[in-house]
Amino acid sequence: MSNKMHIKLNVNGKDEEFLAEPRELLIYTLRERLNITGPHIGCETSHCGACTVTIDGKSVKSCTMFAAQASGKSVTTVEGIGGPDALHPLQEAFKEHHGLQCGYCTPGMIIRAQKLLEEIPNPSEEEIRFGMSGNICRCTGYQNIVKSIQAAAAEMNAAKEAAE
Amino acid sequence: MIPAAFEYYRPQDMAGVFAILQEHGDDARVMAGGHSLIPMMKLRMADVPHLIDLQDVGGMSDVTIVSHEVRIGAMVTQADIIDNTELTAVVPILREAALQIADPQVRYMGTVGGNIANGDPGNDMPGLMQCMDATFTLVGPNGERGVQARDFYEAAYITAREDDEILTAVTIPLHSGGYAYEKQKRKIGDYATAAAAVQITKDNGSCASAAIAMTNLSDTPVYSEAAGVALVGGTLDDTSLKASVAAMLNDIDPTEDNRGPIAFKKHVAGVILRRAIERAWSRT
């Protein structure tokens, strides 16, 4: 056993402080310590992207980062961008366009897509496929995921234009 | 997958890093983005009793461009490379290679220095740095030294870096002419089955110089001087391309693994090198 560390995180806007062993991976902090179960454990080997979260503006696989590394940073999970009462346009679009079947990869897909649309607000299909290539889906064949992201981008861009 | 227990340190400066390295010797390791090391710790293939996270050390995230060279700090990420338009304007092969490393999430975390210092034959930056004749800056308790990329790699995970040294930056001379980084991989996120880095210059219609390095085809990256020499003076017709590929095949030493048998890897290496040379030549 190593010494426990004092770790501070801001998760979805809420400050969290706790003691944890340095070897605690961020995905376990989120799911088991904080009961934030949107990020999923898929492969646990940095390949599938089901555990993706946003940390200080970067999409990160939370199975490949220790909570200690994230200490002092802001973490956003799929829960942080919208919920049942007020869905984010991406959440709405995945629902409307059948962007999921079993749903296991979806939280990672949506939080990654949110970052992608922040960087490229109007992406081509090729840019979506390349930008989403760190997230694996074993059900959909990706076509409806691409459609969902395109639809959300259109919706978000229209809303932005209307606001200007 | 839970790694074995370890102590975690996040020193604020290089003196703090050296103090921990000196106290714990072989039991301590530095980490940049962690996307090579943490998976190995989770598999318990890497045992790191004392883990030194470099994220707060500072001074290693700059890209400096001067007239004849660029200097890239070790903590610059692959995503930083891809987004840096000034850097891409002078060393376009860096972005071309970085886009072929891992996937978007990993590129936000994965650093140039980690990719170079890790010593995994599958990493893409080492071969690229050998092609470009880069120099690595190593800082230790007794000062700083430079090691040529072409002299740095000794065997898988064994490099010229001493245990108490840290790779802090890479300096790349600016090249004129054409370039290409070609990589064959089974899927996004996989290491190369074969990859080739090529820099080439043209004078009066014939090849004036060529630098060629191959990735994941030996236990180190392979700078194939003979493959470059085979092109010089020619117009890159079929005969000189075949001679270059033959010279390269003579320098690599692939092993059979889940990416295929030796004969297949040699075949792919030849195809990839040929494509890289042709694309680099088309850009001269």
Image: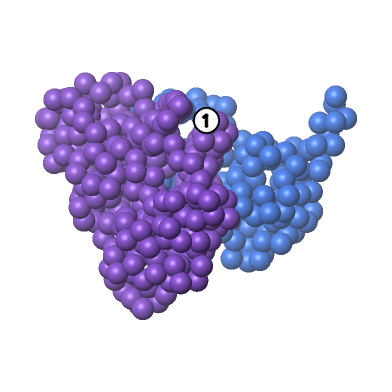
Residue identifier under label 1: A56
Q: Which x, y percent locates residue A67? A: 39, 36
| Above-or-below relation of A89 to A164 | below
Chain on which label 1 sits: A
Residue B65 visible in this rendered orientation of the protein: yes
Query: Disc 1 residue type?
Result: Asp
Q: Which x, y percent locates residue B31? A: 30, 38
Q: Which x, y percent locates residue A111? A: 61, 43
Picture quarter containing residue B54?
Answer: top left
| Front-most of residues A79 and A150 | A150
Residue A95 visible in this rendered orientation of the protein: no
Give the residue at the far front of this rendering. Answer: B204
Count of numbered circles in the view: 1
Which color scheme did the rendering employ for the protein?
by chain
| Front-most of residues B160 and B270 | B270
| Above-or-below relation of A11 to A91 | above
Q: At 73% from the left edge and 59% from the top edge, which residue is drawn? A: A144
In this rendering, would A143 be left or right of B133?
right
Q: At 51% from the left edge and 46% from the top edge, which residue is drawn? A: B177
Picture quarter containing residue B192?
Answer: bottom left
The image quadrant where one finds the N terminus of chain B is bottom left
In this rendering, would A57 be left or right of B232?
right
Q: At 54% from the left edge and 27% from the top edge, which residue is drawn? A: A14
Image hue for chain B: purple
Q: Which x, y percent locates residue B42? A: 31, 52
| Front-most of residues B218 and B200 | B200
In this rendering, would B48 be left or right of A12?
left
Crowding near pointer 1: few (<14 within 10 Å), some, many (20+)? Answer: few
Q: At 34% from the left edge and 43% from the top edge, which residue is drawn? A: B133
Chain in blue colour: A
Secondary structure of the residue carrying numbered label 1: loop
